[in-house]
Image: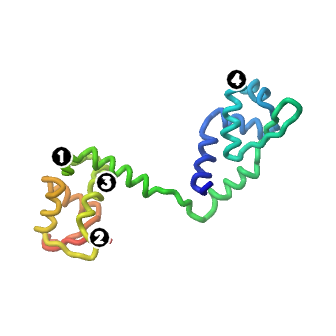
Amino acid sequence: MPPDDELLAFFKALADANRLRIVGLLAQAPASVEELAAALSLRPSTVSHHLARLSEAGLVTATVDGHYHVYALAPERLHEMSRRLASPEPLSVEVDAAADAWDRKVVNTFAGPDGRFTKLPMQRKKLQAILRHVMRAFEAGRTYSDKEVNARLREFCDDTATLRRGLVDYRMMAREPDGSRWWVVA
């Protein structure tokens, strides 16, 4: 299992109040499904479901004792995950993919059938998504005249003033004080 999927499975396993209660009980002593069900006032089938999720994440182990499965907490797994989370190494989470998906959703919400924006969002975060989309029309390392900037922005929206102001305010582009030259901010 990739490291990111492993972390996700770990947190999903603990993202339920009943599973946390089961972990708490198993931290005190191993128990069977029936014992856990009685202690938590849950049906055995519900407890079995939660134990399966905890087992998939490696948080509990099971042993057979006669006709019963006895579940125990796997403290080494908790320690391992806490060490990984406290490690100075950055977690490699695919934030860029999620951000790109969100940007596409915002762009699709505000774009008409022709791909031009019918209106611009008032919310800062959504406007930034639109501006990131607009920035694809500009190349880093190149300068643009005021006329070129307006022409490219007009391809996206008639409200070029809002787009220009946003590009400068959010430091995506910079310009000479007189507006004669524009460039992409690295």
Mark 2–mark 1 Cα distance, whole angstroms, equals 27 Å
Going by the image, does 42 lie left or right of 129? right
Mark 2–mark 4 Cα distance, whole angstroms, equals 60 Å
Q: Which disc is residue 129 wearing?
A: 3
Q: Considering only order in the chain, which callout, 4 or 1, is on the residue closer to the N terminus?
A: 4
Read off the residue under disc 2: 185
Q: Which residue is pictured at 56% across the width and 63% down the height?
A: 90
Q: Considering only order in the chain, which callout, 3 or 4, is on the residue closer to the N terminus?
A: 4
Nearest to viewer (mark 2 / mark 4): 4
Q: Amino acid at mark 4?
A: Arg
Nearest to viewer (mark 4 / mark 3): 4
Read off the residue under disc 1: 118
Q: Quadrant of residue 178?
A: bottom left
Q: Quadrant of the N terminus?
A: bottom right
**Residue 5 placed where, x, y %?**
58, 52
**Residue 107 placed where, x, y %?**
28, 50
Q: Amino acid at mark 2?
A: Val
Q: Considering only order in the chain, which callout, 1 or 2, is on the residue closer to the N terminus?
A: 1
Q: Which residue is pictured at 59% across the width and 65% down the height?
A: 89
In the rendered image, the vertical position of residue 20 relative to residue 1, given as above or below: above
Q: Which disc is residue 43 wearing?
A: 4
